[in-house]
Image: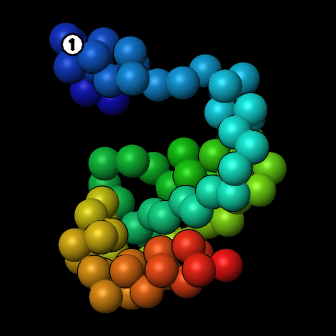
Amino acid sequence: MFPEPRQEALDALCLPEEDVRGIDKRTLLVHGRDDQVIPSQTSLRLLELIDDSELHIFGRCGHWTQIERSEEFAALVLQFLMR
């Protein structure tokens, strides 16, 4: 996705799917529909891998959901944490 050496550094941060599949805590995934940095397929794959997960995709939103949709993001996270 990025030119070397940047991609190598990003790859080093990634967990193997086996480790992601082992996440046993309730997980909230958040994605901006119009994200030009991370494809939405990435979040959809995480949703498949993590058993107790839910995904919220913000429409008309790019990569920075917590900034671009700050009020809705905060309400979503608060609601998730209060359950």
Quarter holding the C terminus is bottom right
On screen, residue 69 versus residue 53, left or right, reads left
Indicate the position of residue 77 as horizontal and vertical percent values: 47, 75
Q: Residue furthest front?
A: 82
Quarter holding the N terminus is top left
Q: Is residue 17 above or below residue 23?
A: above
Question: Taking the image as drawn, is residue 41 in sight?
Answer: no
The residue that label 1 is drawn on is 4
Q: Is residue 5 above or below residue 21?
A: above
On screen, residue 75 versus residue 4, left or right, reads right
Indicate the position of residue 42 as horizontal and vertical percent values: 54, 45
Tell me which residue sits at (46%, 25%) in the image.
14
On screen, residue 46 versus residue 1, left or right, reads right
Which residue occupies the foreground of this view, 28 or 8? Answer: 28
Which residue occupies the foreground of this view, 8 or 19? Answer: 19
Tell me which residue sits at (37%, 80%) in the image.
74
